[in-house]
Amino acid sequence: MTAGRHAPARVDLVLPCLDEERALPWVLGRLPDGVRAIVVDNGSTDRSAEVARELGATVVTETRRGFGAAANAGLEAATAPFVAFCDADASLDPAELPRLLLPVERGDADLVLGRRRPTSGSAWPLHARFANRVLASRMSRRTGTRLHDLGPMRVTVTARLQGLGILDRRSGFPLEMVLRAAADGWRIRELDVPYLPREGRSKVTGTVRGTFTAIGDMSRIFREVHA
C-alpha cells in the first residue's frame, strides 16, 4: 500500500520489530491512508529490515535490545501530528487506527488504547490473559480510570508524548506511558479492537517465563511512577 508516501503523514505508526519478516507484509499492507510506518529493527536476524524498506516503511535501527528501547527510538523519529503504536506480529490490524485516532483528533481524549478482543482461543494464551487482567486492575486503581487492557495498539498526540518523559526501555514502556499520562491529567479512553493469532511466538507473552519477566518490569514501574 502506498499510504502516507506521497503526502505528509497525519499519523506515524511505530512498529517495534524483532524477527517479524513473515508478518510485516500483512501489517504494512493494512496501513490506512495518511499513516507512515516506522519499523524499528531491534536486532532482527531475519530480513525484517529489508522487507520493511521494500514495502515503503521508514526503518530505524535500535541496537539496544528491549521493547521500550525500540518504542522510544520510533517515538523520537516521529514527526507527524499524531503517533500510534502497534505490535508488528500481525496480531493487531492497523486498519483499526482511524477509529482510535478519531477521539484524539476531536479533542475527546488524549490517549486512546485499543482493548484487545481475541478472535479465537489461540490469539491470547490463558497465562497472558490472567496477567493482563491483574495489570488492568492495578492500572484502574492507580489512574482512576476503568481500564481493561494495557492496549498495545494506542494513539496520541506526538509532541505531548515526546514531552512526557518516559524512561523505561524494557517491557514497562507501555505501562509507564499510561501512568505518566494519567499523572499529567490526560483523558484516557479504550476502544475495542480485534486481537488475532500472531505470526510466530511472542517474545514476551509466548512463554510463561517471558510473561513473568514482563510482570517484574511492570511491578517496578508501579513503584517508580506515581499517578
Image (spheres, rainbow, N blue to C red):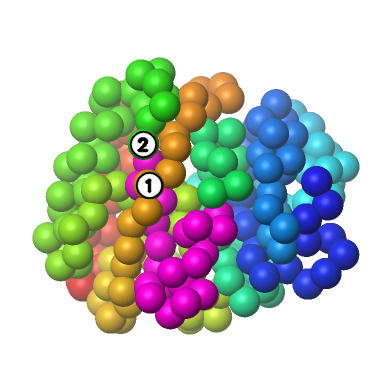
Of the residues shown, which amino acid type is indicated by label 1? Asp
Looking at the image, which residue sits at the far top?
122
Q: Residues within 10 Å of mark 2 (few under 14, many from 20)?
A: some
Is residue 110 shown above or below 95?
Answer: below
Residue 12 percent location from the top left of the image: 65, 63
Q: Is residue 50 left or right of residue 158?
A: right
Distance from the alpha carbon under mark 1 to that under mark 2? 6 Å
Is residue 137 shown above or below 222?
Answer: above
Of the residues shown, which amino acid type is indicated by label 2? Arg
Q: State which quadrant residue 27 falls in.
A: top right
Residue designated by label 1: 192
Looking at the image, which residue sits at the far left?
141
Mark number displayed over residue 226: none
Residue 210 percent location from the top left of the image: 37, 31
The disc, 1 or 2, on the residue closer to the chain's N-terminal end is 2
Residue 134 percent location from the top left of the image: 17, 42
Residue 66 percent location from the top left of the image: 51, 47
- Residue drawn at point x = 81 percent, y = 37 percent: 51
Q: Is residue 138 left or right of residue 91?
A: left
At mark 2, the secondary structure is strand
Q: Is residue 89 magenta?
A: no
Q: Is residue 82 left or right of residue 218?
A: right
Is residue 80 something that shows in the picture? yes
Residue designated by label 2: 117
Is residue 217 shown above or below 203?
Answer: below
> What segment carries the magenta color?
97-116
